[in-house]
Image: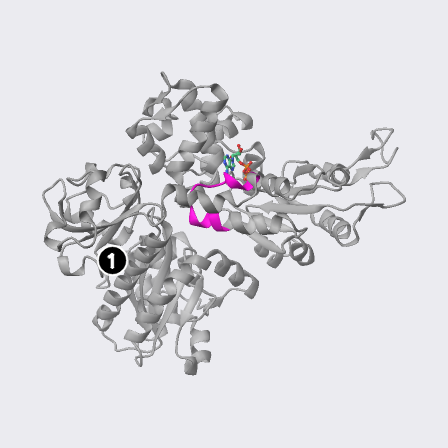
């Protein structure tokens, strides 16, 4: 094996621009380690295993992926049985959420980081298969001293990406060995195995998530059409593409001479834009017909075998589970599996006084969900939202706890009832709870454990009883680990977590858009309709501002429409131009630039981005 010193020297030579016989992805990753993450090849760092609470959160968020990926992992593990391979399934942040390895080597594997909870992001671990795959989105072999960090140069690791149906990287499947032959070519079979398992996981994921849609399986050879197709596409009732297996469709798109591999470009477009079929032709491609008849042709002439699977649940059927939900929780989603699961859990929890932590990016509807839970619980008290990030720090205490008459100079003579008391008998919704100052966290904890509140300057505490819902877009477990959030309060608020998916992850986008348009139409007593190009632009966009941004964009579009027809000109410029908008989830420098463009007016920027003012303030503060 290569010595540590010669490895460091080689990386230094590459940094100086020397030619290297190594593969391009390895060199690119080394340069990222040096230039972007400022890693030092001379400083070896052992594999990092995240704390147990963090692992639990990552696993909870990847619950469905783990379930779907499991059988793929098991099949692959059986294929390589006896060869001392270890399989890791990591999430998009590089944390290993599922693992399969020989328990005899447990200690060695854990030390090498080939274990549950190990973090293989490139900026932490240096060049490694999982990290390089996350950055490039391509399958990759990182063999022995391809690794950047000398701690890992004994390992061989091969990884393939797993994309969700909309084309976002959602996981990485990795196959590794502690010891292997010196030649990198020895891992080619591993590369093939891991890539085909990733393809199957993508297919299984598509099949689970698109129960209400048609699925069109495509293969270049008729024999594999029903058992192992090259790719699959999901289509809604009008023939619009709602999802696909990314890896498989990417290679078919190449064969169809379509430039640009991003499958996002296809979402929302009609199937007849790419193939010589209409939605009405799908039944003739169903199983049972001879394979020879199940042919379709791409626009460039490429012939493919196709097998269509009808929606498992009809649209009417899809409404049945929703009908069993309390009214307030019903129109939260329209066939998105993750949201349906969340709605069912929320309905069960609504009736009990269990504290719930709602997680989700800005604008995903955390407050909307909290209100729906409150309305479903049958209490007659108030719903009192408190945005902990928006209230200035010196006012939070008196706002929340209230104050006694003459408690401090400038206070109202009669004193003031705090928001906690306002919520007595109802629901207190603590939004952005991660921004609550530490000193007040202790006081809040006391209220929750003792069911009484003491106003500022008051001699006696008053009894209160309410349900507490809280929300954060930040990782509270991380704040706890950093000592910025009290662990006891975290456990008290987080009896259970409901995680709202980002809009770009949702599978019911088309129906959600129709629902929001219907709602806007009811308010304006008008009927709105999107033309094909406008709908495609909406489907393609990333929606960093989530539901708030979407709902604002539709409101503006409705106002600009002619006789209710919404075309691309009615959409915000950043949508109709097809570029990604400048948005609050981008870098803080982008945010400063965007703020400058709005004349440093935070309200104007918040309106433009479709987020709350507090979100902008918070992100700017984080930069300071
Ligand atoms: N399921 C839904 N159906 C329709 N509109 C929704 C839904 N969820 C949220 N919205 C709308 O989206 C906007 C944002 O929702 P909300 O304020 O609840 O998000 P949030 O996650 O709490 O945002 P923030 O992180 O900025 O506090 C609101 O205008 C709300 O009415």
Q: Residue furthest top?
A: 563
Q: Is residue 112 left or right of residue 378?
A: left
In the rendered image, residue 387, in percent from the top left (x then y), is placed at 64, 38
In the rendered image, residue 292, in percent from the top left (x then y), is placed at 10, 53
Q: Nearer the viewer, residue 203 or 293?
A: 293
Q: Which residues are magenta?
A: 328-341
Q: Give the answer, above or below, for where 34 lies relative to 536.
A: below
Quarter of the figure with residue 427? top right
**Label 1: how many residues lie within 10 Å, few (<14), some (14-19) or many (20+)?**
few
Residue at numbered disc 1:
24
Quarter of the figure with residue 513? top left
Q: Residue at x 22, y 61 (%)?
A: 227
Q: Is residue 307 left or right of residue 542?
A: left
Q: Is residue 536 left or right of residue 325?
A: left
Q: Residue at x 35, y 76 (%)?
A: 178
Asked if the stretch drawn in magenta spans residue 340, the answer is yes
């Amino acid at each position: 094996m290569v010595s540590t010193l010669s490895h460091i020297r080689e990386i230094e030579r590459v940094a100086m621009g020397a030619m290297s016989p190594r593969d391009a992805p390895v060199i690119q990753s080394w340069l990222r380690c040096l230039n972007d993450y400022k890693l030092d090849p001379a400083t070896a760092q052992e594999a990092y295993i995240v704390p147990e609470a963090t692992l639990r959160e990552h696993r909870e968020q990847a619950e469905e992926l783990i379930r779907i990926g499991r059988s793929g992992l098991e099949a692959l593990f059986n294929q390589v049985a006896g060869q001392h391979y270890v399989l890791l399934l990591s999430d998009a942040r590089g944390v290993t959420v599922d693992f399969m390895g020989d328990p005899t080597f447990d200690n060695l594997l854990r030390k090498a980081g080939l274990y549950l909870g190990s973090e293989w992001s490139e900026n932490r671990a240096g060049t490694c298969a999982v990290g390089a795959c996350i950055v490039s989105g391509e399958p990759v072999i990182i063999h022995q001293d391809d690794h950047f960090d000398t701690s890992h140069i004994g390992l061989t690791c091969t990884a393939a990406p797993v994309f969700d149906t909309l084309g976002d990287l959602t996981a990485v499947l990795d196959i590794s060995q502690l010891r292997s032959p010196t030649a990198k070519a020895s891992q080619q079979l591993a590369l093939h195995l891991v890539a085909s398992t990733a393809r199957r996981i993508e297919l299984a994921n598509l099949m689970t998530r698109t129960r209400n849609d048609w699925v069109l399986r495509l293969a270049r050879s008729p024999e594999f059409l029903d058992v192992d197709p090259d790719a699959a596409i999901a289509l809604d009732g009008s023939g619009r593409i709602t999802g696909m297996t990314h890896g498989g469709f990417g290679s078919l798109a190449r064969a169809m001479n379509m430039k640009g591999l991003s499958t996002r470009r296809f979402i929302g477009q009609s199937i007849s834009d790419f193939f010589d079929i209409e939605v009405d032709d799908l039944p003739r491609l169903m199983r049972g017909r001879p394979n020879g008849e199940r042919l379709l042709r791409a626009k460039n002439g490429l012939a493919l075998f196709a097998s269509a699977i009808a929606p498992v649940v009809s649209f009417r059927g899809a409404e049945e589970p929703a009908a069993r939900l309390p009214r307030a929780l019903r129109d939260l989603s329209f066939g998105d599996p993750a949201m349906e699961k969340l709605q069912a859990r929320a309905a069960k929890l609504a009736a009990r006084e269990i504290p719930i932590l709602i997680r989700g990016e800005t604008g995903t509807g955390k407050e909307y969900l909290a209100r729906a839970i409150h309305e479903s619980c049958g209490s007659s008290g108030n719903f009192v939202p408190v945005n902990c990030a928006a209230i200035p720090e010196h006012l939070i205490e008196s706002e929340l706890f209230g104050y006694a008459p003459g408690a401090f100079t400038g206070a109202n003579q009669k004193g003031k009832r705090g928001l906690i008391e306002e919520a007595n008998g109802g629901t207190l919704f603590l939004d952005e709870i991660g921004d609550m100052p530490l000193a007040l966290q202790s006081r809040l904890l006391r209220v929750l454990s003792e069911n009484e509140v003491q106003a500022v300057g008051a001699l006696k505490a008053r009894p209160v009883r309410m349900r507490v819902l809280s929300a954060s877009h930040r990782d509270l477990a991380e704040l706890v680990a950093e000592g910025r959030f009290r662990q006891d309060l975290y456990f008290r608020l987080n009896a259970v977590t409901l995680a709202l998916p980002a809009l770009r992850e949702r599978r019911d986008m088309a129906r959600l858009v129709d629902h929001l348009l219907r709602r806007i139409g009811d308010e304006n007593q008008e009927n709105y309709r999107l033309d094909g190009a406008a709908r495609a632009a909406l489907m393609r966009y990333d929606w960093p501002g989530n539901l708030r941004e979407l709902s604002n964009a539709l409101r503006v579009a409705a106002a600009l429409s002619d006789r209710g027809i919404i075309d691309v000109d009615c959409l915000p410029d950043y949508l109709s131009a097809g570029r990604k908008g400048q948005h609050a989830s981008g870098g803080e420098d982008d945010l400063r630039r965007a703020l400058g463009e709005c004349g440093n007016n935070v309200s104007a920027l918040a309106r433009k981005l479709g987020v709350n003012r507090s979100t902008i303030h918070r992100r700017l503060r984080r930069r300071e």
